[in-house]
Image (cartoon, helix red, strand yellow):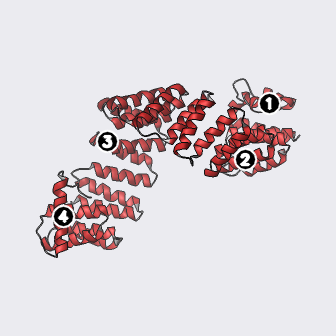
């Protein structure tokens, strides 16, 4: 476990210069044990294993009975991938100093390097028994649990560390990450609320709480949390930026624009920030103002796909479909794996009654992402408009046993099959889709208005589902 350098960095680098001058002159100078430890740790931490080896050899020559340098030799051997030799030395040191925390910590790091994470955790727990400062070890144990995707255990360990060191921002960051990746947002919110009660000036605590509120959809509370960060640290641009994002997701676009502009006053203009402002104006149905910001974004970075997509949307809103196609084609050329771009281009092709091209783009959108409701509605409608329903049915059925499948696909298939006159199959799919998601009963005719032309479908919906969307 590496120790920190002396507080006086200048003194340390004078020490380091003296050691390297000794190497250069091929002489021998005296350094005490603490000085040697600092020098060795520096070289190991910076990956200069050659000089680390020389420092260890000189330290062992001057202090042949100090076990600490045997330990450093084991750490050096681990660094050059001689783990078994390192383990032999650690066993020797352990037999002489069974209460040396660093022996177990070093062995744990070797096991971790070998992807033996359970063994690593066991060694780190042994290190805890004898550690003067357990916080770093708790953090290391949490990393091991994360490597095993055991985030519950990682959270448990991090909460212990937070009790011991409430001002450690790394602990707060790791806790936030673990709560988010496990979707335990409510628990995370409660944890940080409790934490901030006793540590109200923690910038990272308020920031993490703001992020969790945002992910949970509590945008107003998220904005309040970021405001606390800004109150404590008015120069915190990340807080301003995330506050703007929260306004955006809350559909408070004018407020979002104002805060994004504050961000640009605080740091050099960024192409993506221009795009975010453009998106806000798109949502306010002000395409010409949006166009100004997407244009500014592309002046800074003409290879920014989001900028070309934004201009395409502006053209589309202004009825300039052919111009929009040129712009979206540029976006797709830059980023050919974004399903949103293909879905949008399909809309343009549909407007031009180029249904085959629209259908091809929607297939590509599904291939690039999981099926989603919007794309499934579009591909079904385009297939009907282009009179290639049978081809669309075959394609959608091919996704049924893959990760592209979505329960809404049943309803898209029901629509296509009914249009094709395959009544019984359509009703079976309709039943399957509504059993998977009963609430769609009151919306399906809005998604597929043509279904109203089929009395059997309307009758089925009336007879089999009550007004709450549940089977009667």
Q: Which residue is mark 3?
A: 162
Give the CA distance from mark 4 to mark 2: 64 Å
Asked if residue 348 is positioned above or below residue 16 in the image, the reply reads above
Q: Which residue is mark 1?
A: 449
Give the CA distance from mark 1 to mark 3: 56 Å
Give the CA distance from mark 1 to mark 2: 23 Å
Q: Residue at x 74, y 32 (%)?
A: 447
Mark 1 or mark 4: which comes first in sequence?
4
Q: Is residue 300 left or right of residue 380?
A: left
Q: Which residue is mark 4?
A: 17
User: Contact, CB < 8 Å: mark 4 with mark 3?
Assistant: no
The label number, if any, that marks residue 361 in the structure image: 2
Please, which residue is most extreme toward the front here?
299
Element marked by disc 1: helix
Please, which residue is most extreme toward the bottom here?
26
Few, some or many C-alpha atoms within 10 Å of disc 4 (few <14, some 14-19, many ≥20)? few
User: Contact, CB < 8 Å: mark 3 with mark 2?
Assistant: no
Q: Position of residue 101 (x, y in %)?
A: 24, 58
Q: Residue at x 43, y 31 (%)?
A: 262
User: Nearer the observer, disc 1 or disc 4?
Assistant: 4
Give the CA distance from mark 1 to mark 4: 80 Å
Element marked by disc 2: helix
Q: Position of residue 176 (x, y in %)?
A: 41, 41
Few, some or many C-alpha atoms within 10 Å of disc 3 (few <14, some 14-19, many ≥20)? many
Q: Is residue 43 visible?
A: yes
Mark 1 or mark 3: which comes first in sequence?
3
Element marked by disc 4: helix
Give the CA distance from mark 4 to mark 3: 38 Å
User: Contact, CB < 8 Å: mark 4 with mark 2?
Assistant: no
Q: Is residue 226 left or right of residue 399?
A: left
């Amino acid at each position: 476990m590496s120790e920190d350098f002396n507080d006086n960095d200048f003194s340390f680098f004078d020490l380091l210069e003296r050691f390297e001058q000794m190497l250069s002159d091929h002489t021998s100078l005296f350094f005490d044990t603490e000085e040697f430890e600092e020098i060795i740790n520096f070289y190991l931490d910076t990956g200069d294993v050659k000089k680390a080896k020389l420092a260890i050899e000189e330290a062992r020559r001057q202090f042949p009975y100090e076990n600490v340098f045997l330990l450093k030799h084991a750490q050096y051997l681990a660094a050059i991938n001689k783990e078994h030799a390192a383990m032999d030395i650690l066993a020797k040191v352990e037999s002489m100093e069974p209460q040396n925390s660093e022996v177990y910590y070093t062995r744990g790091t070797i096991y971790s390097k070998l992807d033996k994470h359970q063994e690593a955790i066991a060694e780190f727990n042994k290190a805890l028994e004898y550690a003067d400062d357990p916080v770093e070890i708790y953090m290391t144990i949490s990393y091991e649990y994360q490597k095993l995707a055991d985030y519950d255990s990682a959270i448990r360990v991090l909460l212990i560390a937070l009790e011991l060191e409430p001002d450690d921002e790394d602990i707060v960051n790791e806790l936030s990450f673990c709560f988010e990746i496990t979707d335990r947002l409510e628990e995370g919110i409660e944890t940080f609320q409790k934490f901030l009660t006793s540590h109200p000036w923690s910038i990272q605590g308020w920031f993490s709480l703001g992020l969790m509120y945002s992910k949970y959809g509590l945008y107003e509370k998220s904005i309040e949390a970021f405001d606390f960060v800004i109150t404590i640290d008015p120069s915190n641009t990340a807080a301003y930026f995330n506050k703007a994002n929260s306004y955006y997701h809350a559909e408070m676009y004018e407020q979002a624009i104002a805060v994004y502009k504050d961000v640009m006053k605080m740091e050099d203009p960024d192409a993506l920030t221009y795009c975010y402002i453009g998106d806000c104006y798109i949502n306010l149905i002000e395409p010409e103002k949006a166009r100004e910001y997407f244009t500014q974004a592309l002046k800074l970075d003409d290879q920014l796909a989001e900028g070309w997509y934004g201009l395409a949307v502006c053209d589309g809103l202004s009825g300039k479909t052919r111009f929009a196609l040129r712009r979206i084609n540029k976006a797709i050329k830059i980023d050919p794996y974004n399903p949103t771009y293909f879905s949008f281009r399909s809309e343009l092709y549909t407007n031009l009654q180029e249904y085959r091209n629209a259908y091809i783009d929607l297939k590509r959108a599904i291939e690039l992402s999981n099926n989603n409701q919007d794309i499934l509605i579009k591909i079904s409608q385009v297939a009907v408009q282009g009179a290639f329903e049978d081809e669309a049915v075959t394609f959608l059925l091919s996704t049924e046993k893959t990760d592209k499948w979505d329960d809404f696909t049943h309803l898209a298939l029901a629509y296509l099959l009914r249009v094709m006159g395959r009544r019984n199959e359509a009703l079976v799919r309709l039943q399957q889709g509504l059993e998977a998601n009963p609430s769609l009963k009151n919306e399906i005719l809005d998604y597929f208005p043509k279904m109203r032309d089929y009395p059997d479908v309307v009758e089925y919906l009336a007879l089999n589902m009550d007004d709450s969307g549940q089977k009667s």
